[in-house]
Image (cartoon, rainbow, N blue to C red):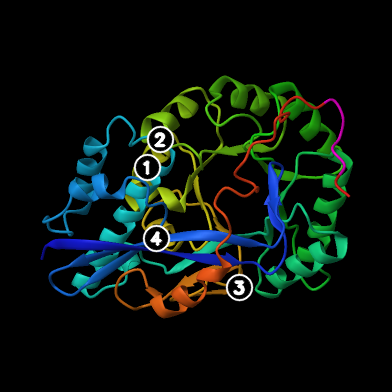
Amino acid sequence: MRIIGYRTLTTVQDWGRPVGDANGVYADGVVRVPIVVVETDAGISGVGLGPCVEIENVFAAIEGEDPRSVTALYDTMLRRTFKAGHAGAVFGTIGAIDTALWDIKAQAAGEPLWRLLGGRDRRVPAYASGLDIALDDDELVAVYGAYAELGVRAAKIKGGLDVEHDAHRLALVRDVLGGARRAGRPSLMLDVNETWTRKQAVRYVSELERTLDLTWIEEPVRRWDAEGHAAVGRGIRASVATGENLTGLEQHRALIAAGAVDVVQTAAVWGITHFLRVAALAHAHDLPVSPIGTTPAGLLHAATSVPNHLVSELQDLHPPVGVSVDVRVEDGAYVLGDGPGLGVRVDEEAVALASHLLPDPLAGGAHIRPERAGRRLHAVDTG
């Protein structure tokens, strides 16, 4: 079997409501989702969701190779792009292709990827994550009520701009997930997407912890600030979760060595091989891992095979337009299917018909850091 080509598509995740975080909001809830399809001469194609930046150069590293040599091909792609491959979108392109290759490998073996990777249990614990910073109280309750109906007992809200507002919203979500018929206290997390300085983080979380039990605070300071994350961790009770935006094993190593992270995260867009390597590094330091991202099918399969998986992020309850995924959510967990590969299928006609929905890639949203992030004296108006 040989790799003979690829094609790229772009669809949308249509949340049907505003979504965003402390950095910005997509007011119409429509977000671009790039897709890579890798083709083989055996008629098997694999699907990866992620960027397509410099894909011609990245693909040149694997063209003509056997896709089943996936971990070796991952390193080949990194070597091909070694001056840019450990940064941002190029690393994401490698991750998308890597995911597609794992999909091909499992399809060729006639097994679901979770089984091929050595997983035993197809159930992957989940927590709710509504990208909810723009929602009012009623909308917030409705969104997390839908997660609660699926048995989800943990949730992460977006915040970091107004401590009183965040405390109020966390309490609302706690009450929704911990309704009268549900035993035990739900787990609550807050994600501030790198919006604070070190001192701001300690002051803010300490205030929340006067009335709330936070499981973790996510990305309290800049992603590369190992000393800062360690300082925050020493000053609060909650765990510190970070790592989703780190593009390379060596970037995780610095935070782990500094004792700066309690829950090690990786993003679905960076690929399966990256996740497996980060999980092994974290396991060597007795740390749990937690994948994040929309439609994180690849990392869900991989999570079944590592001993230190904690919980995986559950964002939108619907896949991107034109994409189907062989997975369901019940009793607070993802349940992976039995079909060969990732179980991700793309209806290219449906994707093409949705092209008019594609937002301008240069438009505002959560991907643009505000000018005064980390330099605010007062709470931001969240009304």
Q: CA distance from mark 2 to mark 4?
A: 21 Å
The disc at residue 298 is: 4
| Magenta segment includes 380 | yes
Left or right relative to 274: residue 148 = right
What residue is at 11 percent from the left and 62 percent from the top? 2
The amino acid beneath tag 4 is Gly
Query: Where's residue 148, x and y in %?
Result: 71, 70
Residue 226 higher or lower than 45, as above or below: above
Q: Residue 121 versus residue 381: which sits nearer the camera?
A: 381
First of labels 2, 4 by sequence position:
2
Q: Which residue is mark 3?
A: 331
Q: Which residue is mark 2?
A: 87
Q: Which residue is mark 1?
A: 91
Q: Quadrant of residue 301?
A: bottom left
Residue 308 higher or lower than 81, as above or below: below
The disc at residue 219 is: none
What residue is at 72 percent from the left and 34 percent from the top? 237
In the image, the segment drawn in magenta is 377-381
